[in-house]
Every structure is written in C-alpha cells, then in structure tokens.
C-alpha cells in the first residue's frame, strides 16, 4: 500500500527537491501531483484525492493555511507544512498539522514524519479498510452511533447520505447510522467494489443485481432497493457490467 501525496509550493526548485527526497527516502509515498499556488492545488487535490499534502506556508496571494480553509474537509488529509520560517510551527499545530518540516529539509526528519503518518493511516484502516477485489471477506470495524460492529466488506449493500450522517444498509437486513458524511465514506471506500452513483448514494457493486433505464437510470440492489444513478455515473456502471459479465 502506497499513500498518494500532492506538493504545493510556489518555488519550482523546492518542489523538485521535495519530490526527489520523497522518491529516495519514502517508499511508502508516491507524488500524484504538484501545484505552485492554492488555486492550482484545489482541482488537483479533488481529482487525485491524496492522503498527504506537503504544503508550503508563504506563497503569493494566498498562503497554505488558507488552502486548508478552502478544502471541503481538510481533516481527512495528513498535512505536512514545509516552511523556511520556524515561527510558523505553532500556528501549523493549531491548524491540525500532522508534521512541520523546516527548510532546508532534513531527509531523516522527512523520513520519520512520513513513517508516522503511514503507521497512523494503517491503524485507521483497521476501522474501515479500503477494498481490493480479493478482499470482500476482510473483516472490518464500523463505528456507529451506538458503538461499533464487526463485519465483512461484502456485508455492506449500500450507504446513503443523511446530512452529516450516513445510513449503512447491510446484507442481514439491518441498518447502522454512522457519524460520517457520505463523502468521507466514499474516500475511505474509494476502491474497486464501491461506487458513488449519486450525490446521496454509495453502492457495493458486489450487490448490484440489475441496471434499469427507467426514471433516468436506477440500480436494483440485492436487498430489493432501487437507487437513482446520476447521468455522469452511467458509464462507470456500464463499464463494470461489461467487465464482469457476458451479454446474452
């Protein structure tokens, strides 16, 4: 498992040096993108959905702290502030930084900081592990409003949005309410079997029984529930069906 990262720094040489150190010292991390300003960084972050942001603080027009305020949910990222000014360290901690690295970068400090993030992320995945096709039987823990429940990934049929909560519908007919947004669930389950089909629905493709063209597009799930499909998600549904079955 590798963690994706994005580097945001207005100095091209600083970005190059940091990328080089990551490639050399941090095998757990891959650099998915770079940006030289906040406006350029936001669409890259939304597209790549990295786990780690390596973020400079002093940049023209808008600083690194403002980037975090403009993200939909900055708490889901591990933010490593990279700055040439040590007096920013206290504010970085107040902003919830995972680490603060002083320029010029020390390879050992970078390596140790990344390792801590990797271990923390691995521990988090024991609560809600990302899915690969061979891992439908992996046991996970879902924390809900009354405690937590152990289950297999294949036990989840679909997850629906309800304000800042989600309703998790299970194969045994029960339902759990979790204090997480659907976007958060989507990020944690952004792997092979789980697909966001609509602004309010995340489905487990393992439980997809039928695709219906009525009412603009619907999925029929194994529990009999029909869920709407957003127009721009139809191609992904059809790609899955074409990959996993033969037409008759």
Image: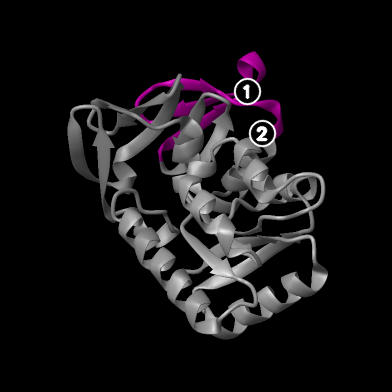
Q: Residue at x 62, y 39 (%)?
A: 71
Are the residues tagged 1 and 2 within 8 Å (C-beta)?
A: yes
Residue 99 is left or right of residue 126, and the answer is: right
Work out whether 8 lies above or below 64: below
Task: Give the position of the C terminus as an image quadrant.
Answer: top right
Q: Residue at x 57, y 32 (%)?
A: 197
Question: Considering only order in the chain, which callout, 2 or 1, is on the residue closer to the N terminus?
Answer: 1
Residue 119 is left or right of residue 22, and the answer is: left
Q: Which residue is farthest bottom?
A: 24
Q: Residue at x 66, y 34 (%)?
A: 234
- Given residues 94 and 184, the one toward you in this image is 94
| Quadrant in the picture for residue 106 | bottom right
Residue 229 percent location from the top left of the image: 60, 26
Tell me the SS state at disc 2: helix
Q: Residues within 10 Å of mark 1 (few under 14, many from 20)?
A: some
Q: Which residue is farthest top?
A: 215
* Residue 209 within the segment the image draws in magenta: yes
Residue 164 percent location from the top left of the image: 43, 24
- Given residues 188 and 159, the one toward you in this image is 188
Residue 20 percent location from the top left of the image: 67, 81
The range drawn in magenta is 207-232
Residue highlighted by disc 1: 217
| Quadrant in the picture for residue 171 | top left
| Quadrant in the picture for residue 235 | top right
Work out whether 174 lies above or below 190: above
Residue 62 appears in view: yes
Residue highlighted by disc 2: 234
Tell me the SS state at disc 1: loop
Q: Which residue is farthest front?
A: 87
């Amino acid at each position: 498992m590798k963690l994706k990262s994005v580097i945001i720094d207005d100095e091209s040489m600083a970005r190059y040096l940091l990328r080089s150190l990551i490639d050399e010292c941090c095998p757990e991390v891959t650099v998915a993108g770079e940006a030289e300003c906040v406006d350029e960084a936001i669409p890259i972050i939304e597209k790549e959905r990295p786990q780690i942001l390596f973020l400079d603080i002093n940049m023209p027009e808008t600083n690194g702290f403002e980037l975090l305020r403009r993200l939909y949910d900055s708490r889901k990222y591990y933010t490593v502030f990279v700055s040439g000014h040590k007096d920013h360290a206290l504010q970085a901690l107040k902003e919830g930084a995972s680490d603060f690295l002083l320029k010029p970068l020390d390879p050992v400090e970078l390596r140790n900081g990344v390792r801590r993030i990797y271990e923390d992320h691995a521990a988090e995945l024991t609560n809600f592990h990302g899915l690969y096709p061979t891992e439908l039987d992996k046991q996970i823990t879902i924390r809900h409003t009354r405690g937590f429940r152990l289950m297999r990934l294949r036990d989840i049929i679909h997850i629906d949005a309800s304000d800042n909560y989600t309703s998790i519908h299970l194969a045994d007919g029960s339902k759990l309410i979790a204090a997480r947004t659907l976007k958060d669930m989507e990020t944690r389950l952004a792997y092979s079997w789980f697909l966001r089909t609509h602004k309010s629905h995340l489905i487990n493709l393992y439980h997809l029984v039928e695709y219906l063209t009525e009412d603009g597009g619907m999925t029929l799930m194994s529990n009999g529930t029909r869920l709407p499909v957003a127009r721009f998600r139809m191609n992904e549904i059809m790609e899955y069906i074409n990959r996993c079955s033969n037409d008759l």
